[in-house]
Amino acid sequence: MAIIGNTEPVRQGVTRLGLGGSSLPADPETAYRIITEALGAGIPYVDMASRYVNHQGVTLLSQVLRHNPRAAFTFGYKYPHWTISSEREFFLHLEELLRMLNLPHLDVLLYWGLTLQQCEQYGGRGGQFEWINHARRKGLVHKVGFTANDSPASICRMIDSSIFESVTLELNLLHTANLPAAVYARSKSVEVNVHGVMGGGRFGRDSSILNRIVPGILRTPELALRYALGVPEVHRVLLGVSGEQQLAENIAFSAKGGLSPDDRVLVDQVVLESSAAWERFCDSCGACGCCPQDVAVTEMLKLYPLIAFYAITYYPVKKYTRLLQDNRGYERCNLCMECVNRCKFNTLVPEILSFTHTVLNKKQGGIT
Ligand code: SF4
Ligand code: SF4
């Protein structure tokens, strides 16, 4: 990957990035090339699970470890904790993994998609966290983290278990609900990594509205990445990358640094105003979801604010195309008005669905 000109900002930017394994392409050769380019550019962290890259995640990681300077990066291994039922099984899993990776220890063992209920169960007498501490004492595991699959309040309680050195949270400019958990984690000296900064593809393409919020930022993916980098509690942003071009673009954006607090306020204001406007019609209660005609009401109601408030269409078109393929599009609606009758705001749901259908249909050049 060619990096032209002053490389110092690039170097500083990439140190706050990590490469998330979940979006890597299924082809191991392409995935390997992307990881190698990321490490070559200075990204110092990779997270991996055995099921990533078409279930070849561990093989790929061992290849990466063999051919790249070990000092240049650390990695997190997403551990399938729910499949392990005894300490013996845990150590067999760990030792087999280390044998495959040809390593004396794991950098970071990640509890994958942990819930508070699992955390409390594992923290009990003779539970998984005792095994983890045995593994730490034996020098087989350096750090332990978790990727959270629970509410912000529950994440804070999991942090209180005192077993974890890091937490990985979902955070992006439209989804800041986990921010209090991030603040709490930092107050407990737990490192905060974030994923989903591109909103699962929502911010991957340009939005004419998002592109004019912060002066000088004319690309939506740039705004999304630099928004996350601008959150002071965030230690590292995990990139979900499926191609080399996308990787290069993200590296270039990160070199410009995180958004300033003032610029983040500009973004937060737009999001707040849009949410307030939409919440007068819909609080996502789901009561209108059971359509007798099987129209995908709930799913389409989630697409509407993206189109109406943010001019985001690429992601909604993809989602709506799938709904049409499942024969759950708006054209099934017979205007029975059951959804309207169920809504506490008396929202004219069919009108919203019709608008969503029309815009997406037009963008797709006639989906139906
Ligand atoms: S019933 Fe009303 S508030 Fe609830 S999801 Fe439907 S439109 Fe939104
Ligand atoms: S008005 Fe249309 S979308 Fe609403 S419940 Fe009836 S058929 Fe379904």
Image (cartoon, rainbow, N blue to C red):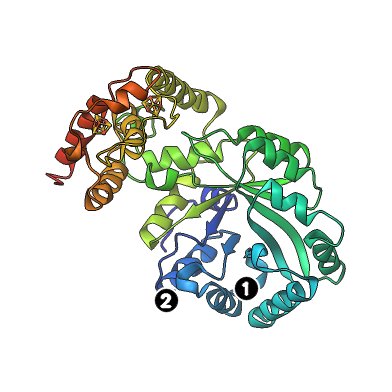
Question: Based on the displayed image, in which of its 4 quarters is residue 132 positioned?
Answer: bottom right
User: Is 247 situated above or below 233?
Assistant: below
Question: Based on the displayed image, in which of its 4 quarters is residue 336 positioned?
Answer: top left
Query: Residue shown at 55%/41% (left/top)?
Result: 229
Q: Residue 232, position in %: x, y? A: 63, 35
Q: Residue 188, position in %: x, y? A: 78, 40
Q: Which mark is residue 69?
A: 1
Residue matched to label 2: 29
Could you tell whether 213 is left or right of 93 in the image? left
Towards the viewer: 336 or 156: 336
User: Is 251 situated above or below 268?
Assistant: below
User: Is 211 situated above or below 38?
Assistant: above
Quarter of the image that includes the N terminus: bottom left
Q: Residue 57, position in %: x, y? A: 53, 72
**Which of marks 1 and 2 precedes in the sequence?**
2
Badge 2: few (under 14), some or many (20 or more) residues near its Cα, within 10 Å?
Answer: few
User: Is 17 situated above or below 72?
Assistant: above
Tag 1's secondary structure? loop
- Does the beta carbon at disc 2 come under 8 Å from ligand 1? no
Query: Residue shown at 85%/62% (left/top)?
Result: 126
Dividing the image into four quarters, tell me where ligand 1 lies.
top left
CB atoms of marks 2 and 1 within 8 Å: no
Question: Based on the displayed image, in which of its 4 quarters is residue 75 positioned?
Answer: bottom right
Badge 1: few (under 14), some or many (20 or more) residues near its Cα, within 10 Å?
Answer: few
Q: Amino acid at mark 1?
A: Pro
Q: Which mark is residue 253?
A: none
- Does the beta carbon at disc 1 come under 8 Å from ligand 1? no
Q: Determine if residue 164 is in view.
A: no
Q: Amino acid at mark 2?
A: Glu
Q: Determine if residue 330 is in view.
A: yes
Towards the viewer: 323 or 315: 323
Q: Residue 304, position in %: x, y? A: 31, 32
